[in-house]
Amino acid sequence: EQLQSAMKTSQTIRNFTPRAQFPHFDYPGFIDTLSKLCYGDDFPKYNRDVGDLVVPAFYQPDDELSRKCQLEMREEIERGQDGSRMPKVVLQSILGKWSFDRHIVHLKTKKVERIHGTVKYSKYWERSLDDDDTYGNEMFKHDTKDNPVLYREDGLYEFSPTQKFEVFREYEYECKHDSLEIYFVEGGKRALLFLSLKFVPEAAETKFANDDGYWVKATSDHLCIKDLYSATFRVKLNGLSASEVIIKYRVKGPAKDYESTTILKPQWS
């Protein structure tokens, strides 16, 4: 009788017009009650503590299926916490237009140079296909979900108070396994690998959180002949959107000793 009454109530909720997006405000409680009426107190079989994740597979009699589901959930959580999926999250989050401000500090002379302007991160299918871009058209024919992202920077280089130059540069960003790889672009084509960014695990102390998002961080070194580039790439995430990017290079070599810090902010219009 109690089960029939519960099923009738559930049917009424299901058929209500207009139907609410989440008609049952407490799904775990609802399925707990329903399974208790059907099977007694034996379900869910696993993850019974308050706050544990539960799925429908825990509310059925096939123990092998329940254990398999529990194992897959544990593995999925571990993969999500080891940093290996962060490159794809970051790459998607930074797509769009940004303004940037870069300061280059020469550590021996204390001279400071500034570059400021705009950056656009775009998938290749977003580029204009009216310029007979063979590579772009070829990319457009295939699935673009995991295509490389083009970084295009246009700015004004303030070398001194009286010397200013318009500059640009391009890179390609691409996820490879657990890394975010950055390639030089020369003559409109991908050239050599510049950096392979490895993101730190979520549990590391280098991830900072506050009310309006959290920071994730990756590092990489690049030896260019005798010059060592030590890079730090930090992204502030709000959900799946990035609200700030900080790219820092420490460059040291026979004729170079400087630190470059670039701060990117989204352009909302």
Image (cartoon, rainbow, N blue to C red):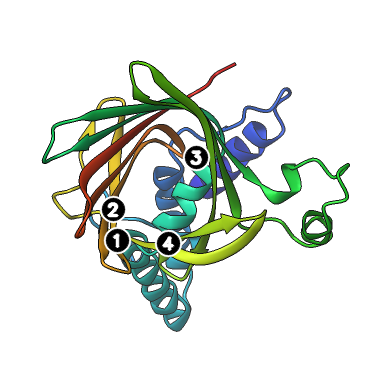
**Which residue is rendered at x = 46% and y = 40% of the image?**
240
Secondary structure under tag 4 reads strand
State the residue in front, 69 or 43: 69
Foreground disc of the pair 4, 3: 4
What amino acid does circle 3 point to?
Answer: Ile
Q: Which quadrant of the rendered structure holds the C terminus?
A: top right
Which one is earlier in the sequence, the residue at label 2 or at label 4? 4
Quadrant in which residue 225 is drawn: bottom left
Residue shown at the point (40%, 67%) measured from the top left: 178
Residue 120 seen in render: yes
Q: Amino acid at mark 1?
A: Ser
Residue 107 placed where, x, y %?
A: 13, 40
- Residue 61 versus residue 4 in the image, above or below: below
The earlier-in-sequence mark between 1 and 2 is 1
Circles 3 and 1: CB atoms closer than 8 Å: no
Which numbered dot is residue 94? 3
Q: CA distance from mark 3 to mark 1?
A: 19 Å
Which of pointers 4 and 3 lies earlier in the amino acid sequence?
A: 3
For label 4, the residue is 194
Q: Which residue is mark 1?
A: 220
Of mark 1 and mark 4, the one earlier in the sequence is 4
Q: How crowded is the residue under tag 4: few (<14 C-alpha within 10 Å), some, or many (20+)?
A: some
Does any portion of residue 50 appear in the rendered image?
Answer: no
Tell me where residue 160 appears, x and y as whole percent.
32, 22
Give percent across and percent down for residue 168: 54, 37
Q: Are circles 2 and 3 on residues that touch, CB within 8 Å?
A: no
What is the spatial separation of the Cα atoms under label 1 and label 4, in whole angstroms? 9 Å
Task: Kindly check if marks 1 and 2 are in contact, taking CB atoms under 8 A apart as contact.
Answer: yes
Residue highlighted by disc 2: 231
Q: Which mark is residue 159?
A: none
Q: CA distance from mark 4 to mark 3?
A: 19 Å
